[in-house]
Image (tube, rainbow, N blue to C red):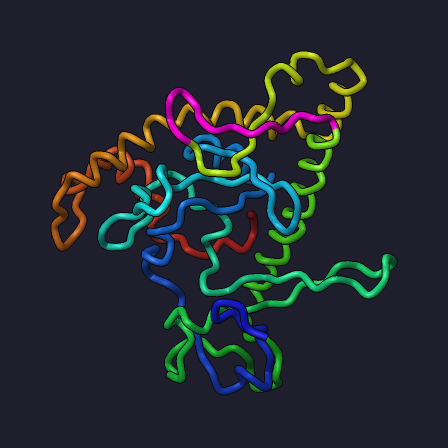
Amino acid sequence: MAQNGLFPVTYTRHQHRYWRRFTSFEFAADRAECAVVMPEILQIAAAFPIVFKTSERGIEPLALLSLPPHTRTPFVSQDGRWLAAYIPSALRCHPFRAEGVSPQSLKQIRQFVLCVDETSELVTSNPDDQAFFDESGRLSPELQEVQIFLQARQSAIETTAHLCQTLDALGLFEPIEQHAGVDLPPGALGIAPLRLQRLSQPEKVILVDSGAFQLIHAHQISLTHCAWLTRAQQQLAQQVFPEKYTENSDISGFLYAVANAQNDVFFRTNEV
């Protein structure tokens, strides 16, 4: 089965195939948002607006990369460098993803399948690139690292979903169309301030003990980025870009400075 070029990594299909690590974030240049997870929520809140949306997994937090949608994000330079101070975990393992497999019974642990986007041009037939499998038929060490990272992120997705279920059960979500005069994407949800003020003491204890208060605060603080993100995109739309990105060629000299330490790191296998 394939979804938008996404195929499970199998020995039968990929034993003679190879892959390359991405060297450009151009694949994310037109993305308006990406799902985020609790272990990275503070770093996300420091760089991007966070809203909630309903997906096939339920309600989940999203980092907004573009306002309005369908416009290029200012976080990707014209030569494909990531310019924000933090790289969301959802973007670090392109072209690989972990897809959940529904258990056959309630007693079974949810499993995940490593998948690869074969339309990414990073899947090749060139032996000079990284192999999918070693000579014994096991995933290559490099791909095992990717798998471990993605499995950890899938676990974090489930934890984050549980926290969102807690917020939803307490009636804390409400539609949010604007913040500080900035239009937000259709379907965006935010934390209802009046409901938050009226929480009972036992409800507050639930939020504190579960860690959901951190998610609430991250969302609230992060919305201050909306005005900046809109202004940045307006300025980008008015500019003519050089062929190569330099520190002074974008609106994002500041972004360039804070992102320098991030630009050479694409795979982080020890943390989400």
167, 171: nearer the viewer = 171
In the displayed structure, 112 sits above or below 196; it is below
Identify which residue is drawn at 56% across, 32% down: 189
In the displayed structure, 196 sits above or below 88; it is above
Image x and y of residue 220, in percent: 52, 23
Q: Is residue 250 rendered to the left or right of residue 131? A: left
Magenta residues, as a range?
170-183
Location of residue 258 (image quadrant):
top left
| Residue 200 magenta-highlighted | no
Total tally of numbered discs in the picture: 0
Q: Is residue 84 rendered to the left or right of residue 101? A: left
Q: Quadrant of the N terminus?
A: bottom right
Image x and y of residue 35, in percent: 53, 46
| Residue 177 magenta-highlighted | yes
Identify which residue is drawn at 62% across, 14% down: 194
In the displayed structure, 249 sits above or below 201; it is below
Image x and y of residue 101, in percent: 70, 64
In the displayed structure, 62 sits above or below 208; it is below
